[in-house]
Image: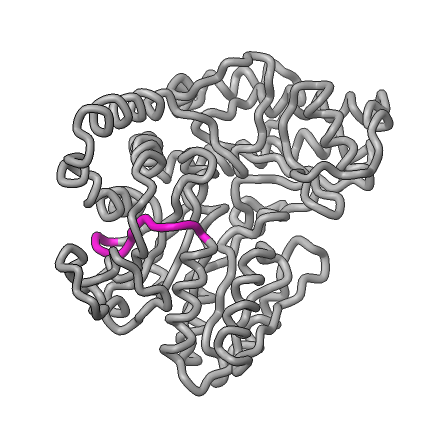
């Protein structure tokens, strides 16, 4: 990092120059001493979200009652989807909000495999989020075992074998499905290149954007992507359990049919026809009544990101993760930490993993003793998430000081290696 200085004054100077600094005021930050570096798992609460929910609960539901469905609720999956589309590089009519990431992944995996009959190979990687792999395994079982899942390995747990991935894609490949930014190391794929490799072989591509959208540039249309899914409670700050979204390229929408034929996917749901006729376009990928409260809360948070703009968010994310790595090299590497993320900013999302043999116990001590919230990912990753909308450089500086203190004073030794249910 050019001009790096490990002093707090240097961090304060970087904050003074930050053109996104004013956005921190748009979030609820009740504990000034808390260092929150877990926005890659659950984003902070935007101030406007609470105000929006009060309106929805008190006026739209409390006063309007069922009339709310014809006053904006019914169109919400499409309306909010169009706002998310602006964050993921999709033209109108290709993104809709529905269900959870896993359910959306299941719907699109089954639809994609049926669209490539006679092909038996599904490709993912060993760095993918495990629940994505579970969905793929379940889909193979459901379809009678006619497909096989092959995983691209990683020699270091940070970067996948890209040459191996390119060799693996071939005439029997039905689907390539990967996380754009992988959850442990933060490695970021060249999605346009991977998509081109798959299309050359006649395969479809499905991207999981959960650790990417809202933090790194996503250009689904420019990539030529077929399908994508993503959650909204990380960098989109939609709140715990907020609904997910899915993308289907326009020319594929009326040829793919998801496996769950729900009420809202019906062409005319309020005709109550006894036979299913799929809706045109993205509506066929819905299932049932959406969770209105959480969807409208999430809509308010997406609007903050749109005002900030992805180019500025990405610029700050790279600068802050570079700064975090430089501080770690200076203060934490001599104390047993190693970098578990790509060093090059162009290959990295918006979180940094630091590896240490006592990573889990260090994580416990940071949360319970030093008021720093990161998260832990087995076997040894202390994961630090940078959310450019509200993370300051002084937060990063102070966070690294607290990590150093935990190790120097051996505060982690107060904890056993037995893990809590959620890490």
Give the percent coordinates (x, y) of residue 12. Answer: 55, 15
Name the side, left or right, on which 145 lies relative to 417.
left
Residue 163: image x %, image y %?
A: 60, 70
Residue 295 left/right relative to 251: right
Q: Residue furthest bottom?
A: 118
Q: Is residue 137 above or below residue 83?
A: below
Position of 175 relative to 238 (above/below): below
Residue 70: x and y in percent read 13, 40
Residue 314 can be seen, yes or no: no
Q: Mainly helix, strand or loop, the magenta region?
A: loop
Q: Quadrant of the C terminus?
A: top right
Which residue does the image show at 15% across and 55% down from the upper left? 270
- Magenta range is 91-101
Q: Is residue 314 magenta?
A: no
State the residue in front, 124 or 217: 124
Question: Looking at the image, can residue 365 be seen?
Answer: yes
């Amino acid at each position: 990092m050019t001009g790096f200085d490990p002093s707090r004054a240097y961090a304060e100077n970087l904050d003074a120059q930050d053109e996104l600094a004013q956005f921190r005021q748009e979030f609820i930050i009740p504990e000034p001493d808390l260092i929150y570096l877990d926005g890659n798992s659950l984003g902070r609460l935007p101030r406007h979200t609470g105000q929006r929910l009060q309106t929805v609960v008190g006026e739209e539901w409390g006063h309007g009652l069922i009339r709310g469905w014809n006053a904006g609720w019914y169109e919400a999956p499409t309306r909010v989807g169009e706002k998310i589309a602006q964050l993921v590089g999709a033209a109108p009519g290709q993104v809709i909000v529905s269900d959870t990431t896993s359910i959306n992944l299941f719907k699109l995996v089954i639809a994609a495999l049926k669209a490539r009959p006679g092909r038996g190979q599904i490709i993912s990687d060993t760095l993918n989020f495990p629940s994505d792999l579970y969905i793929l395994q379940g889909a193979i079982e459901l379809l009678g075992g006619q497909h096989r899942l092959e995983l691209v390995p990683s020699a270091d747990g940070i970067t996948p074998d890209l040459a191996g991935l390119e060799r693996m894609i071939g005439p029997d490949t039905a689907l390539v499905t990967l996380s754009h930014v992988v959850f442990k190391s933060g490695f970021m794929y060249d999605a346009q290149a991977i998509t081109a490799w798959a299309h050359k072989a006649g395969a479809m591509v499905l991207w999981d954007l959960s650790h990417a959208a809202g933090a790194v540039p996503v250009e689904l249309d420019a990539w030529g992507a077929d399908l994508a899914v993503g959650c909204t409670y990380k960098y989109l700050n939609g709140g715990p359990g907020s609904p997910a979204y899915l993308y289907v390229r326009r020319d594929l929408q009326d040829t793919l049919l998801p496996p769950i034929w729900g009420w809202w996917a019906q062409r005319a749901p309020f005709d109550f026809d006894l036979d299913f006729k799929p809706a045109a376009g993205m509506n066929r990928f819905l299932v049932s009544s959406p969770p209105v409260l959480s969807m409208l809360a999430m809509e308010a948070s997406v609007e903050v990101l749109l005002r900030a703009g992805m180019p500025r968010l990405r610029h700050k994310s790279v600068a802050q993760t570079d700064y975090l790595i430089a501080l770690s090299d200076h203060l934490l590497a001599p104390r047993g930490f190693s970098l578990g993320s790509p060093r090059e900013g162009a290959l990295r999302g918006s979180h940094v993993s630091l590896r240490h043999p006592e990573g889990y116990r260090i994580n416990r001590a940071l949360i319970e003793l030093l008021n720093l919230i990161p998260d832990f990912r087995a076997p040894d990753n202390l994961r630090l998430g940078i959310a450019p909308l509200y993370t300051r450089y002084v937060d990063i500086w102070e966070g690294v000081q607290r990590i150093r203190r935990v190790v120097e004073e051996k505060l982690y030794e107060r904890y056993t290696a037995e893990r809590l249910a959620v890490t």
